[in-house]
């Protein structure tokens, strides 16, 4: 039950975030682009969402959290001694086991 409430809450948060981001893109486009380029026209909310998705595909991809964060953690992992790695893995597994019991 608690898992469902969290899942619904996260899904609702994602939908609100998409709506807000779409509105921000639409507002910025309609404020900046028609003033800069002759013949450019204002866009509506659906076009703003399309522009947001297009920019995500072209510049960010759909690979999740990736990027510099993963490289930073990988560098930390490489700098660990084998004993530190084993200690980290043990702590990680015990933390995962606790979360599975929720």
Image (tube, rainbow, N blue to C red):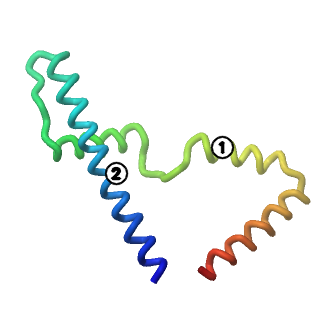
Nearer the observer, 62 or 8: 8
Nearer the observer, 71 or 1: 1
Q: Quadrant of residue 88?
A: bottom right
Return the residue at label 2: 17
Which residue shows up at 13% across the image and 40% down it? 44
**27 left or right, relative to 65:** left
Q: Residues within 10 Å of mark 2 (few under 14, many from 20)?
A: few
Query: Alpha carbon of mark 2 to alpha carbon of mark 1: how far?
Result: 27 Å
x and y percent of residue 73 in the render? 70, 48
Nearer the observer, 28 or 48: 28
Q: Quadrant of the N terminus?
A: bottom left
- Does dot 2 land on a helix, a strand or a loop? helix
**75 left or right, relative to 55:** right
- Mark positioned earlier in the residue sequence (2 or 1): 2
Nearer the observer, 102 or 76: 102
Q: Quadrant of the C terminus?
A: bottom right
Which residue shows up at 34% across the image and 63% down it? 12
- Does dot 1 land on a helix, a strand or a loop? helix
Q: Residues within 10 Å of mark 1 (few under 14, many from 20)?
A: few
Give residue 29's mark.
Answer: none
x and y percent of residue 94 in the render? 75, 73
**Number of marks present in the image shown:** 2
Indicate which label's residue lies in the foreground, 2 or 1: 2
Which residue shows up at 67% across the image and 72% down it? 96
x and y percent of residue 53 in the render? 30, 46
Q: Quadrant of residue 29?
A: top left
- Answer above or below: position of 4 versus 46: below
Q: Quadrant of residue 36?
A: top left
Return the residue at label 1: 71
- Answer above or below: position of 88 versus 76: below
x and y percent of residue 42 in the render? 12, 31
Which residue shows up at 55% across the image and 48% down it? 66
């Amino acid at each position: 039950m608690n898992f469902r409430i969290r899942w619904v809450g996260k899904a609702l948060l994602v939908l609100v975030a998409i709506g807000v981001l779409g509105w921000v893109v639409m507002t910025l486009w309609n404020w900046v682009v028609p003033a800069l380029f002759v013949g450019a026209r204002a866009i509506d909310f659906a076009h703003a969402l399309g522009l947001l998705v297009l920019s995500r595909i072209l510049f960010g991809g759909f690979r999740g959290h990736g990027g510099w964060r993963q490289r930073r953690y990988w560098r930390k992992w490489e700098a660990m001694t084998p004993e530190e790695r084993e200690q980290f893995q043990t702590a990680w597994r015990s933390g995962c086991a606790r979360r599975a019991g929720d």
